[in-house]
Image: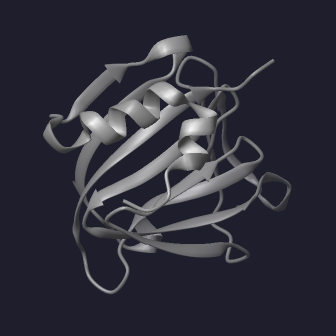
Amino acid sequence: MKDLNKIKELCPSAYDFIVNKADGAAVGKYELEGGAYVSVQEYTTKARSEAKYEAHKKFIDIQLILSGRELIAVTPIEKMEIKDEYNEAKDVMFFQHNDECTDYVLEAGDFLILYPQYVHMPGVCVNERSLVHKIVVKVPVSE
């Protein structure tokens, strides 16, 4: 794994999960301390045109790749046009596609911390579709 100190500072229980339980964790949701949780996911990446830009208000996302390779596009929320209004129950809103973003290619051990002021589009294939096994940690935003 790459340097996980940022995750440890943000959410010690997520750090503990990643270091001690991630390798054997089945796909699913795992509750952590303080309202945080981990979602272990496995999926095949898709073309950029099939992916969605999303943002959250209540949670910070930490997206960490366990295996596979994917592109996550990121841009400040003020540069985006809302497509689907905020769904409070699901803590998500979706945005129109926008080419004014920064692309991050993540491989095993790489992670991104995505704060609510950033829109992100995960799950995009780099050159060809790839099976991705990843962890998404949801850390509640401090009021």
Colouring mode (rainbow / by chain / secondary structure / one colour): one colour
Query: Residue 135: which quarter of the image?
Result: top left
Reply above or below: 126 against 80. below
Reply above or below: 43 against 94. below
Quarter in which the C terminus is drawn: top right
Quarter in which the N terminus is drawn: bottom left
Q: Residue at x 75, y 22 (%)?
A: 142
Q: Residue at x 13, y 38 (%)?
A: 24
Query: Residue 43: which quarter of the image?
Result: bottom left
* Place of residue 30 in the rendered image (x, y in percent of width and height, measured from the top left): 32, 22
Inspect this view and state whether residue 53 appears: no
* Place of residue 77 in the rendered image (x, y in percent of width and height, measured from the top left): 78, 52
Reply above or below: 134 against 48. above
The residue lying toward the viewer, choosing from 118 and 26, is 26
Q: Residue furthest bottom?
A: 127
* Place of residue 117 in the rendered image (x, y in percent of width and height, measured from the top left): 78, 46
Inspect this view and state whether residue 80 appears: yes
Q: Residue at x 73, y 75 (%)?
A: 100
Q: Residue at x 19, y 36 (%)?
A: 27
Q: Is residue 30 left or right of residue 52?
A: left
Q: Is residue 139 left or right of residue 129?
A: right
Query: Residue 57: which quarter of the image?
Result: top right
Q: Residue furthest right?
A: 78
Q: Is residue 40 left or right of residue 78?
A: left
Q: Residue furthest top?
A: 34
Give the number of callouts.
0
* Place of residue 39 in the rendered image (x, y in percent of width and height, measured from the top left): 35, 33
